[in-house]
Image: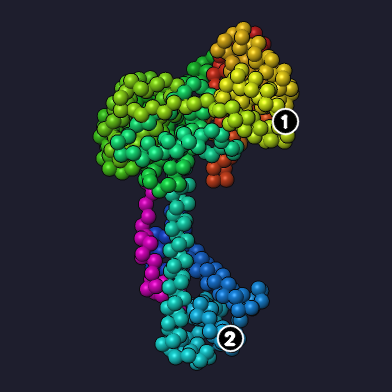
Amino acid sequence: MLTMNMKIDEINSDLLRQTLNGWQQGQPVPDIWAGLTMLAADGHRSLAQIGIALHDQLSNMVLESLNHQRAAEGFSAEIQYPNTRSDLLSSLAADFTHGNRELEAWSAVYSRYFSTVSLSVNEMSSAIPVTNRQLSRRLNLGLGRMVDLLQREELAYRQQFRAAHQHRHLPGHSLYHLFGVTESVKLVAELLRDEKVSFVSIEGIGGIGKTTLANAVASQMATSGDWDDILWISARHQWLTEHGEMRADDQSARSLYEILAKMAEQLGLTHLAGLTSQDKLLEMRKLLLTSPYLVVIDNLETVDDVRELLPSLMPLAGATRFLFTSRQSMAPFGHVHVIPVKALSLGDSRGLLESELRRQGRLPNISDELMTQLYQTIGGLPLAIKLTAAQMRHLPLTEIVAQLKRATRDVPGRLYTYIYRRSWQMLDDMGRQLLLDLLDISSLGESLDWLKMMSALPDDLFEKALSQLLDHSLLEMNSEAGETKYWLHRLTVTFLHTEILSDWGSGV
């Protein structure tokens, strides 16, 4: 759980003056600075290291502000700071000849606390010349400006740090533009802020974008400051290996016990490990009932006993909200607010298709008639549109539409199977091998190093195979805090299990 030890109003002129005077006397910084998030967010710095970082932060702040004020008075952009006592006094006196109180304040603070030579107040007031009281006012003004800047920077950093902290359990931001979700994100976010709503379920068929919508909502919530933290639990089927063995995904949770264990882990309540589900519920209730948390459970339909899960979660939903994604409707549970995910409109479908083509480095040139035919054939399913765009590298859209029409006419309900099989056929042997090598990938994504570790391919062939999977939209990619992660869509996994691995012995 994120904590902030230092209150913003504790950053004040008295503390700053105490710290600056202490530095001149060789004293360490006061312990309270360890609670400054911008300096100690990782929690691993010693007080001495925090003192060095604080000195650098304040020194840069003073020099930047002094440069700004001097530039306003026509000084050269490249200011040379004096290294001798006489030069420093001359520079200080020059700063006090313009009648600029801000310049005088920053120059006084620099000369008193941050210059390479130490000046006393008497030396400074004699060189300007001003009375000690007048100089004290300038120093107080400068310290006050430093406090204002430090408070603003700390607030901004806390907001960024809180957002990054609350993103740590989420699948990550898509690298590509999302279409047709703005209104749905707004609706779900409003419901989650409604005191009368504790459970919201995002529902729809596979490939329609339920997880994408939930992730967009959770990502927005992470920057709002409304929640103490955001949890993300993925409930998924077991994996079928190429050897025909079922293996559990250790990143997923499919029972009440597993979901509560994941929640306790993400809440940092490690002492609950090993307790029964009822004991975990009692302990977590103390926190979740009064503190606002957002708990997302993705792929709820894969949970073994939803009828046991939902009533068990109800006592936790005081200040906390629960957001589900599910192919099956939670409407029979009267306390769950259901949000059906609609297929993309024709306009948003075109926007997504053209965006995917531009990502491939191709100029979209699709007639209204052909776009309408495609839309009538596959509907506004985002995943189907992305896969179709990828196939346009190898086939003209007219041929793809014609084949899709024949396939869906001959075998209704097999749209994704046909699209995936066509994508599979477009891969070479290395691309197919890498795709199967990645079947154990976590639903929350894995790093490039993990992909390389799982692959049996040499580096040069791995890179070519990886490029194929990304080009064909068979491997999803997202980025968060500068880290790129990869994962497989559930329908991709389903296709590989049911259509490829089941026929593996026949040489498909």
Q: Provide the secondary structure element on which disc 1 rests.
A: loop
Residue at 67% from the left image edge and 26% from the top image edge: 368
Q: Which residues are magenta?
A: 1-27
Q: Which residue is mark 2?
A: 94
Q: Is residue 257 above or below residue 403?
A: below
Query: Quarter-wise, where is residue 232 in the image?
Result: top left
From the top left corner, tell me how far across and down residue 125 is, in percent.
48, 89
Calculate the distance from the C-alpha at mark 2 to the C-alpha at mark 1. 65 Å
Q: Is residue 13 above or below residue 84?
A: above
Query: Quarter-wise, where is residue 243 in the image?
Result: top right
**Residue 215 seen in this snapshot:** no
Quick one: 166 or 245, which is closer to the camera? 166
Image side of residue 428 versus residue 115, left or right = right
Quick one: 175 or 117, which is closer to the camera? 175
Residue at 43% from the left image edge and 73% from the top image edge: 144
From the top left corner, tell me how far across and down residue 165 is, in percent.
45, 46
Image side of residue 9 versus residue 440, left or right = left
Q: Which residue is mark 1?
A: 365
Q: Provide the secondary structure element on which disc 2 rests.
A: helix
Q: Is residue 172 above or below residue 143?
A: above
Mark 1 residue type: Asn
From the top left corner, tell me how far across and down residue 465 is, in percent.
69, 28
Q: Residues within 10 Å of mark 1 (few under 14, many from 20)?
A: few
Q: Say whether residue 421 is magenta.
A: no
From the top left corner, tell me how far across and down residue 343 is, in percent.
52, 25
Q: Say whether residue 11 is magenta.
A: yes
In the picture, the disc for residue 269 is none
Mark 2 residue type: Ala
Quick one: 360 or 346, which is closer to the camera? 346
